[in-house]
Amino acid sequence: MSIASTRLWFSLALAIVPLVEAQATTTDAEFAKLFVGTWRSTSSKEGSNAAFASITYVADGSFKMILYDESCKGIRHEAAGTWQIKDKVLHTKTTRSVGSQQRLRAGTITKDKVISVEGDKMVLRSVAGGLLYRTKGEPCAQK
């Protein structure tokens, strides 16, 4: 490895350490405050319609998820339920689910590890191990 690449890796490591330390010291209550609002999925996986999905976390511990069609004029699926952050894990329980694409059926419980919440960006790790990316804002506002 050249000196230049070693310096680059060292610089990147130094830049990441404060982020990791800041996330490690963030309490569940602080994370919960950061979650409140509407988030859109920013998955770029080919064939995925996740870019047309939004989830709104309300401070009272409720959530609403909407999956829009590609035109952003119709709703394919809506789900609602409760959420909380416990031990840096997002716990959700779906209590209502309607629509043609039942992604979250009533009774579904999910637990996603909070990796980071910075400004308008959120990263979670699903129980299945994949990363979930969210950006604050309405999914169809950019259409």
Image (cartoon, rainbow, N blue to C red):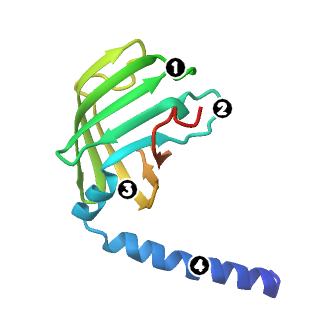
Residue where numbered disc 2 is placed: 46
| Mark 3 burial class by Cα count in 10 Å: few <14, some 14-19, many 20+ | many
What amino acid is labelled 3 in the image?
Val
Location of the N terminus (image quadrant): bottom right
Marks 4 and 2 close (CB-CB < 8 Å): no
Callout 2: SS: loop
Place residue 7 in its image quadrant.
bottom right
Location of the C terminus (image quadrant): top right
Marks 3 and 4 close (CB-CB < 8 Å): no
- The residue at the point 24 percent across, 61 percent down is 28
3D distance between C-alphas at marks 4 and 2: 31 Å
- The residue at the point 17 percent across, 45 percent down is 60
State which mark lies toward you, 1 or 2.
Answer: 1
Callout 1: SS: loop
Place residue 27 in its image quadrant.
bottom left
Dot 1 or dot 2, earlier in sequence = 2
Residue 26 coordinates in the image, percent (x, y): 31, 69
What amino acid is labelled 4 in the image?
Ala
Residue 125 coordinates in the image, percent (x, y): 43, 50
Dot 4 or dot 2, earlier in sequence = 4
Disc number for residue 114 = 3
Disc number for residue 13 = 4
- The residue at the point 57 percent across, 82 percent down is 14
Residue where numbered disc 1 is placed: 69
